[in-house]
Structure formats: structure tokens, C-alpha cells
Image (tube, rainbow, N blue to C red):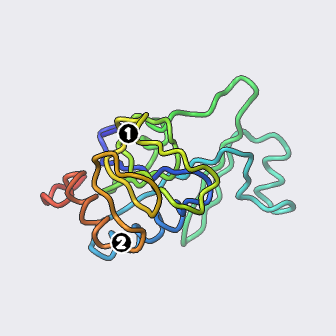
């Protein structure tokens, strides 16, 4: 597993249902008592800050990192400089607090184990598994299984069972 953590990714083309699946699996796995963290890869510019907010003003003024802290949560935003490149998944995972499992949405080209989501409604119908030996299962309603375990998109409990078994969570080992 990447960075000595249990990690499994969910990958698929746009509109395949990755975010819905990650949210459903987080709810299922945390309901079973596991501590789950997530990493979401974005292919486009994004912002979690609101224009005009204090932290936004700090960033606009040139702060390289801004931490927002309250009694309920905290967040750290890091501004990339012109000479920085997107950090690899291992680096991001290493910054996470200890947990039992990290679910990764996206990072199609990563070398971690992944579950491919194939949906007829996706923008692209080309299966990812034939070109990626790190894909260990398939979820969805489109295409062949490529000899991998296949789950329907509504079989959340079965998918969670597979993840527990595949990552070793079911053996009672915790991070």
C-alpha cells in the first residue's frame, strides 16, 4: 500500500459516479467502525475559499499557506508557486492523520490498487482495466469484467466487504 497505508482508489471517466460511490462507501465503512479518510484529485483549477473571506484575503496578499482553524475543524490551503508541480499521491497521503483506510477518488494513473467504475452514462466508454494492472475490481453497468470481480453500483455493502478483504481490514488489523 502507498505510504504504508491501506489505500484503494475509485477511478472512472467523467459522470461515472465516482463521488457518489466514495460518499456511499465512506458512510458504509465508517458505519462499520472504520476511520476513513479521502483524497479527491481535481483535474481543473478549484478553490475551497470564498472571495472576500479573511483567509482568501491572506492568500491574495501572497501567503504561501493559510490554515483556517476552529473548534470544529481545520483546513490547510497551499498555494503552488510557478516552479512547483502537483504533489504525488504518496506525499498527500503522508500528510493525513492516522486512519484505517484512505479512499482515493481519481488518480487514474496512480500505482495504488483501484476499483474501476464503468457506467453507460459516462462520457467515455473505454474500459480502464485492460491497460492498468492495479485495477482489482469493476463496479457498474457497462462493459466486460476483464476477469475481475464485478459489483453493481447499488451493492455498497458487498463493495465494502470486498474493500475490507482486499486491504486487510477484515483481518482486524488497524493502522
Q: Is residue 64 above or below residue 106?
A: above
Residue at left 70%, top 35%?
A: 80
Which residue, as the protein is rendered here, is positioned at the far top?
83
Residue plotted at (27% across, 72% down): 33
- Which is nearer the eye, 80 or 142? 142
**On residue 11, which mark appears?**
none
Q: Is residue 53 left or right of residue 23?
A: right
Q: Quadrant of residue 27?
A: bottom left
Please give left or right for residue 144 compared with residue 148 in the image: right
- Res 141 → quadrant: bottom left
Q: Tell me residue 163's x, y (percent).
A: 28, 58
Q: Which residue appears farthest toward the left when viewing the image?
A: 171
Between residues 42 and 172, which one lies in front from this camera angle?
42
The residue indicated by pointer 2 is 156
In the picture, residue 158 is in which quadrant?
Answer: bottom left
Residue 79 location (% of width, % of height): 71, 40
**Quarter of the image with the N terminus in it:** top left
Residue sitting nearer the eye, 140 or 57:
140
Outermost residue on the bottom side: it is 31
Q: Which mark, residue 112?
A: 1
Question: Of residues 102 and 59, which is closer to you in this image?
Answer: 102
Q: Residue at x 24, y 60 (%)?
A: 164
Residue 35 in the image: state x and y as whole percent: 33, 64
Amino acid at each position: 500500500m502507498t505510504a504504508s497505508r491501506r489505500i484503494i482508489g475509485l477511478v472512472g471517466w467523467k459522470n461515472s459516479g465516482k463521488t457518489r460511490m466514495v460518499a456511499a462507501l465512506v458512510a458504509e465503512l465508517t458505519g462499520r467502525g472504520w476511520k476513513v479518510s479521502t483524497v479527491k484529485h481535481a483535474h481543473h483549477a478549484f478553490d475551497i475559499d470564498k472571495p472576500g473571506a479573511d483567509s482568501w484575503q491572506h492568500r491574495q496578499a501572497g501567503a504561501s499557506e493559510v490554515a483556517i482553524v476552529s473548534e470544529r475543524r481545520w483546513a490547510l490551503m497551499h498555494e503552488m508557486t510557478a516552479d512547483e508541480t502537483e504533489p504525488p499521491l504518496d506525499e498527500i497521503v503522508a500528510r493525513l492523520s492516522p486512519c484505517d483506510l484512505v479512499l482515493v477518488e481519481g488518480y487514474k494513473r496512480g500505482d495504488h490498487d483501484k476499483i474501476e467504475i464503468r457506467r453507460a452514462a459516462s462520457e467515455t466508454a473505454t474500459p480502464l482495466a485492460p491497460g492498468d494492472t492495479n485495477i482489482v475490481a469493476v463496479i457498474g453497468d457497462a462493459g466486460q469484467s476483464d476477469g475481475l470481480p464485478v459489483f453493481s453500483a447499488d451493492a455498497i455493502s458487498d463493495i465494502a466487504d470486498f474493500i475490507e478483504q482486499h486491504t486487510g481490514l477484515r483481518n482486524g488489523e488497524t493502522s
